[in-house]
Amino acid sequence: MSFLALLVSLLLDLALRHFEQLRGPRWFRAYFESLGFLTQAADFWRACFGVLVIVLVPTVVTLFIGHLLDHIWGGLGFAFAVLILLITLGPQDLHAQVDEYIAAVRAGNTGRAEELARALLRANPPAEPAACSEAMTHAVFSEANERLFGILFWFALLGPAGAVLYRSTDFLRRLPAAEPRSTEFIQAVGRLHGVLAWIPAHLAVLGYGLAGSFEDAVSELKTFYANSTMRFYQLNEDLLACAGLGALRASGRDAGTERLRAALVLVRRTLIIWMVVYALLTLVIRAW
């Protein structure tokens, strides 16, 4: 049932992209502001408690509604699962966003290209076009985990509640800097998100290797781990970019929009690989 819900939601996501604006962080920001008193804790453990409360409330509510609808009729539970996935994926379509950037670069529309790059990178992009495309390529690999692979993994593991858990944590860490939060609270959010993203990030890394140059991806990872001094929950974004760029070496493309497009193709192949694996696992479990 969960595999079918994943498949249906991904197909609907392709067909209903004009509803993208409905799944932005506005609902979460309103909810967050109502619990703003939990974000000011100067003690780390109190900050952790505040993070867990903010994240778990929508997760538990989703879990309760899902179980209730399943109990009433399985079809309602299925429709609810698809709806939750449609709300939690993204919120923006990564492929459409990057394709628009590539089109703007090739058309010479530097203003639009810079605007799109800033939206994806969440920072001012490099002024040099090649460096900007390289930064966008890095972002494609890490954002694919945030917008797609992380949501799908936690949905497969915990159902709709898992998707809400991951998206709530991601929204919480992406809140504007102007939002009143203590340093301890921000650190607690970063740790929780890093832990939740660790397994899907490593599955995505494996997928990048299988979909591209496996030997180059492994070689880049060995070098990365040998030189890294960060803790495991801090590695995800750099790890994804490192493995993705290594896997792209088989394409032979230099830095630029061609390699950026190749990164999108690699993400699509990785998604197909893991959907096939998940389908086979579902069949095996049902047969068992």
Image (spheres, grey):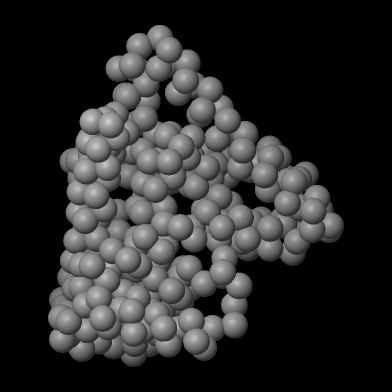
Whole-percent x, y for residue 84 in the image = 39, 34
Residue 96 appears in view: no
Spot occupied by residue 192 in the image (x, y as percentages of width and height): 61, 55
In this picture, residue 20 sits left or right of residue 179: left
> Residue drawn 28% across and 88% down?
130
Could you say which quadrant of the image residue 54 lies in? top right
214 vs 8, nearest the viewer:
214
The quadrant holding residue 217 is bottom left
Q: Is residue 1 above or below residue 88?
A: above
Res. 84 in view:
yes
Q: Quadrant of residue 273?
A: bottom left
* Depth check, front residue: 264 or 284: 284
Give the vertical position of 145 relative to 15 (above or below). below
Q: Residue 196 at what x, y percent from top left?
A: 52, 54
The image shows residue 98, relative to residue 55, as above or below, that is below
Q: Which residue shows up at 35% across the image and 53% down it? A: 148
Q: Residue at 41% across / 53% down in the picture?
A: 150
In-image side of 91 versus 40 (left or right): left
Extreme-right residue of the structure: 43
Quadrant in which the C terminus is drawn: top left
**Residue 104 image position (x, y, % from top left):** 21, 72
- Report the residue that reaches farthest toward the front: 288
Q: Quick one: 69 or 26, which is closer to the camera?
A: 69
Q: Nearer the viewer, residue 175 or 2?
A: 2
